[in-house]
Amino acid sequence: DHMHAHMHAHTDGISPQFVSVAELTGPRTGTPDRSFTLEAKKTMIALHSGEIKEAWTYNGQILGPELRVKQGELVEVTLINKDIEDGVTIHWHGVNVQNAEDGVAGMTQDAVMPQEKYVYRFIAEQTGTYWYHSHQQSSKQVQMGLYGVFIVEPDTTLPQKTADMAVVLHNWQAENGTTVSLGELNRLQRKIAEPGTLVRLRFVNAENLTAQIHISGVPFQVEAIDGTDILEPEDLIDSRLDLAAGGRYDVTFVMPDTVVGISRQTGPFAHDGNVLVVSPSNEGMPPDAVKGPIFDPASYGTPAQTMFGPDTRYDRNYTLVFDNRPGFYNGKFNFVHTINGSVFPDAPMFMVREGELVKMTFVNRGFDDHPMHPHGHRMQVLSRNGKAVTGSPWITDTLNVAPGETYEVAFIADNPGIWMDHCHNLEHAAVGMSAHIAYE
Ligand code: C2O
Ligand code: CU
């Protein structure tokens, strides 16, 4: 990983004051409630265009197996690398596992080389929609297919008949230059749901750019962002959902007796058409997408008291300024995306102590979106461009900061270790847009 190649040297050089990652494991003993085995391997796949392409998969599937567990369960996942020469790992994106289970090659573990295996163990504490992906050369390996969905269900039976499905956005870079997008290779998928059923769509953006999603034909609600429920979500009609790279939205609606269409905008004038329809029967086309207002998480749902307010005194205040400059990275001339003027491994190390309240201000002076993703912690968004959040507490692990925007976020330092804090446009991370949060 060029993103991680230096990391050993880097962290080793300054590690004595840190807690040792090796001791920060999940429960190593006890019978797991759920065990899964994921085998990373090369797999030939056929794109919708007919092109045959080499993919790198977990278990030979173009979207890795969907792992579903219940809250509170002890989860054990055995990773086996069959033939991925550069080595692989599994990072549990958005799940605040213990540091040694975080799957960052060169930092929390060594990459798992061909014919090797590695066992992850952790308790699934938070309900919600998450995903997993390799964190060795992430930019390349996620693109090649090493990712899947991880869902933690509440430990109760659902009150209502629910049709629950993940909708994963991913681009396969095809040889002829066009890209094939959205889960399951962009074939028009039709899912059947009986009228009156509660439908829950778990959108996961496994691409590098913000995804613009339209849902037409039914009023819907955004039930959760990055695994955290929204308090009293209101009905949205024809709103466009802009989903950060790496982020998740859970959307629910009551199935009408007409067809619902899910489509995406791929540029100011381009539209993918319907990529998924949810339909009461095998027939019927959804209505055309209406380009409604953009959904705004900052003013959605009902506010509530949280541990962060206008009077909170923070133990640490950090500002991260994102910018661009031409520069060399790994010997190649590139446009690098900087954090406080630096690129990895010179980017800042944000020091915290366990129990501290930490505020971070993200300022984007560059010309690209930067979806910021701290590992191991969830951030509460306090304000955007100086305006406080007025809706339901907005808790996220992947926050898109658009050019010109400023966000203030806060989190509690409650998960000791050393954590990546990087841009989830993984191509940016690969050219150095990566910092750390470290416990002292
Ligand atoms: Cu989803 Cu550090 O990544
Ligand atoms: Cu970025």
Image (tube, rainbow, N blue to C red):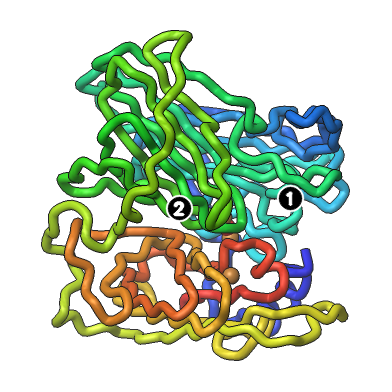
The N terminus sits in image quarter: bottom right
> Which quadrant would residue 6 be assigned to in this image?
bottom right
Q: Residue at x 37, y 73 (%)?
A: 354
Q: Position of residue 426 (x, y in %)?
A: 65, 62
- Residue reaching furthest bottom? 341
* 261 with respect to 432 (left or right): left
Outermost residue toward the top? 282
Circle 2 packing at 10 Å, graded few (<14), some (14-19), many (20+), is many
Residue 81 drawn above or below residue 68: below
Identified at 32% across, 72% down, the residue is 410
Amino acid type indicated by mark 2: Leu
Image-based side of 297 in relation to 133, left or right: left
SS class of the residue under badge 1? helix
- On the picture, is 56 further left or further right than 65? right
| Res. 259 in view | yes
Give the numbered dot on residue 353: none
* Residue 97 visible in the snapshot: no
Residue 7 location (% of width, % of height): 71, 73
**Helix, strand or loop status at disc 2:** strand
* Drawn side of residue 241 relative to residue 348, left or right: left
Q: Position of residue 254 (x, y in %)?
A: 26, 25
128 versus 304 height, above or below: above
C-alpha distance separating marks 2 and 1? 21 Å
Q: Residue at x 73, y 86 (%)?
A: 326
Task: Between residue 74 and residue 240, name the one nearer to us.
Answer: 240
Circles 2, 1 touching at the beta carbon (< 8 Å)? no
Q: Pointer 2: what residue? A: 243
Indicate the position of residue 30 as horizontal and vertical percent values.
47, 34
Residue identified by numbered label 1:
141
Which circle, 2 or 1, is nearer the viewer?
2
Marker count (numbered)? 2
What amino acid is labelled 1 in the image?
A: Gln
